[in-house]
Amino acid sequence: MNSRITIQRFVAGSLFITINALFYFKYLYRVSLPMGLVVTGGYIAFIYLLFSLYKRQKLGFPVWVWAGVMGLLTIGSGLILHFIPKESLNVDRWEMIQLFWDSVSDGIYPYGVHSPEGNYPGPMPFYFIVAYPFYKVGEIGWMTVGSLWLTLWYFQKRIDRNSLGFLMLLLLSSLAIYWEIFARSTIFINSLLFALYLFGLKDLPKRSGLGFYGWAFIGGILFSMRTVFVLPLIIWGMYVCLRKEIRMIRIFKWGLCFIAAFALTFLPFYCMSPHTFMRLNPFVTQGDVLLPFSYVVCFLGLAFVVPFFCRKYADVCFYGGVLLFATISGHVVYGLYDNGIESFLTNGADISYYLFCFPFLLETIVNKDEE
């Protein structure tokens, strides 16, 4: 196996384990310090055993087994979601979705309305469009359950059974995923959708006409979820330009189509209240939620440098995940510096943002296309 690929898999696996270890320690520490340490150690030991079974080709279960496991998870999640009122949670993503669509149904500009705590809806329009069906059924937690089904559907067509078993057990042993479901968070589904799109861009040079520009249109719409996706997008754009896989004039036209589709998602809300839109919009609300602007500029600069180290398309996905991890780590470190360890143990340094990395890390861990 190529040593570069081995190193990338090791790094991606280590980052995935680190994220979950942080979750296990943070939430079990609330029971007691010994509990936090013991359970985190148990998780790491389980992952070591899991990796050993993977190397010995012992995880090659049929796809129907994972479909059955997912069915049980879906039923169990439904029961637990029923008994955990969303109003009891200290996570307001479900509240922002409800506030947004309640405002729209009342004919009110949604980005100008705040919650009782004073928070305004921050994500971009397509984020709320993805969430709309779950808002209508009254349970945002189904978004993450649906994203796990989508993960199974996507990877079972691309990787062997042993690798699929490894990937599914990594996900199903992830406290971050269960936190995402029961806290009614929405990060994983956002990241998964954009990551699957980015993985698909590998074949863009082979496309032409409507297929070529159609991918730009889809990308612009999907980008209208979270601004953080600009980091892997820059890495991809620079990679394509450096390798000259697509003529610059075509890339320029593709980019214009991408931007037009992105802008189109804002048009209905601009028309609702042009004056308020200029004062209150996702760019203003989310401007420095993760990091101060000067820090953001540094990570954007890294996104332009990293592509010079990309040899193959798998590197784009790998470095996209690593840069997202570094950016969220910057947010966590900044929170620790600002408010001390309590910002990690209670609130302030939001480790849930690490879920943005998951699809990119998992792709690197199980991808064998570049061997």
Image (cartoon, rainbow, N blue to C red):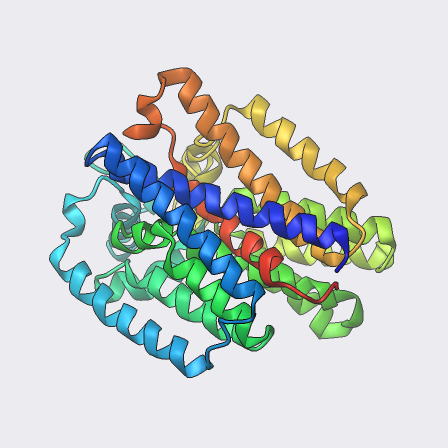
**Picture residue at 26% right of the left edge, 57% below the top:** 105
**In this rendering, position of residue 165 left or right of residue 216:** left
Q: Position of residue 81 (x, y in %)?
A: 19, 59
11 or 191: nearer the viewer: 11
Above or below for 135 versus 95: below
The part of the image, by quadrant, that contains residue 240 is bottom right
For the image shown, how many numbered marks are present on the structure?
A: 0
Q: Work out whether 289 lies above or below 172.
A: above
Assign the N terminus to one quadrant of the image. Answer: bottom right
Nearer-the-camera pick, 359 or 94: 359
Q: In the rendered image, is residue 200 in sight? A: yes
Q: Residue at x 85, y 56 (%)?
A: 249
Q: Position of residue 351 (x, y in %)?
A: 40, 37
**Is residue 100 placed above or below 285 in the rendered structure?**
below
Q: Quadrant of the C terminus?
A: bottom right
The one nearer the camera, 50 or 152, is 50
Residue drawn at (56%, 67%) of the image = 56
Residue 294 horizontal/vertical position (percent)? 58, 22
Does residue 122 appear anywhere in the picture? no
- Position of 369 relative to 238 (above/below): below
Query: In percent of the image, x 77 and y 48: which residue is there?
Result: 310
Residue 84 screen position, x and y as percent: 15, 53
Name the side, left or right, on which 226 lies relative to 20. right
